[in-house]
Image (cartoon, rainbow, N blue to C red):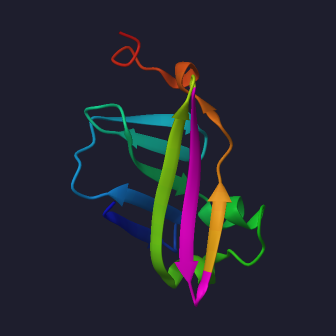
């Protein structure tokens, strides 16, 4: 897939998105995480606020400096029953980290558009 990314060091926000697909809807799945869906309800992107704090809680090597020097970032996900299983792949400074996100139940975040 053709993923693009942007890291805003000042506000500590990481956005990873599939550039060719258009976003139909954005779902706030936690206080610091927003998932973007395309017209087919596939995950198109993710925004993580307080990204260095979030990733740093799993791996101390992922800090603002690491994120500001990213060479690439992408997401991989699977739909399993009523959940999204998301993996964020970060590459920087010759290192690669695969960071799984907590499973997200689709029905907890279903908007009126998705609930149909």
Q: Give the range drawn in magenta.
A: 83-95
Residue at 44%, 60% in the rendered image: 15
Q: Where is residue 39 in the image (x, y as percent from the top left)?
A: 25, 33
Q: Which of 4 and 15 is in front in this view?
A: 4
Q: Which residue is drawn at 58% across and 89% down?
A: 94
Q: Is residue 90 located in the magenta-colored stretch of the structure? A: yes
Please state if 114 lies on the left or on the right of 108 as rendered.
left
> Quadrant of residue 89 in the image?
bottom right
Residue 10 visible in this rendered orientation of the protein: yes
> Is 27 left or right of 24, judged from the image as shown?
right
In terms of image quadrants, where is residue 53? Answer: bottom right
Count of marks placed on residues: 0
Residue at horizontal 57 percent and vertical 47 percent from the top = 86
The picture places residue 74, in percent across and down from the top left corner, at: 46, 63
Dividing the picture into quadrants, the one containing residue 66 is bottom right
Q: Measured along the vertical axis of the image, is residue 99 above or below residue 62?
A: above
In the rendered view, would you say 90 is above or below 115?
below
Name the residue furthest bottom: 93
Q: Position of residue 20 (x, y in %)?
A: 21, 55
Name the quarter where the C terminus is drawn: top left
Q: Would you place residue 33 above or below residue 75 in this image?
A: above
Q: Is residue 58 magenta?
A: no
Query: Height in image: 18 above or below 107?
Result: below
Picture residue at 49% right of the left edge, 43% below the top:
34
Q: Which residue lies furthest to the top in this view?
A: 116
Residue 46: image x %, image y %?
Answer: 46, 51
Residue 12 in sight in this render: no
């Amino acid at each position: 897939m053709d993923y693009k990314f942007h890291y805003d060091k000042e506000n500590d926000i990481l956005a990873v998105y599939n550039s060719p697909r258009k976003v139909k809807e954005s779902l706030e799945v936690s206080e610091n995480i927003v998932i973007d869906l395309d017209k087919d309800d596939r995950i198109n992107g993710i925004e993580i606020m307080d990204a260095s704090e979030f990733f740093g809680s799993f791996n101390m090597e992922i800090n603002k400096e690491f994120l500001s020097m990213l060479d690439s970032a992408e997401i991989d996900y699977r739909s399993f029953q009523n959940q999204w299983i998301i993996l964020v792949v970060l590459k920087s400074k010759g290192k690669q980290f695969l960071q799984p996100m907590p499973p997200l139940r689709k029905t907890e975040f279903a908007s009126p558009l998705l609930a149909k």
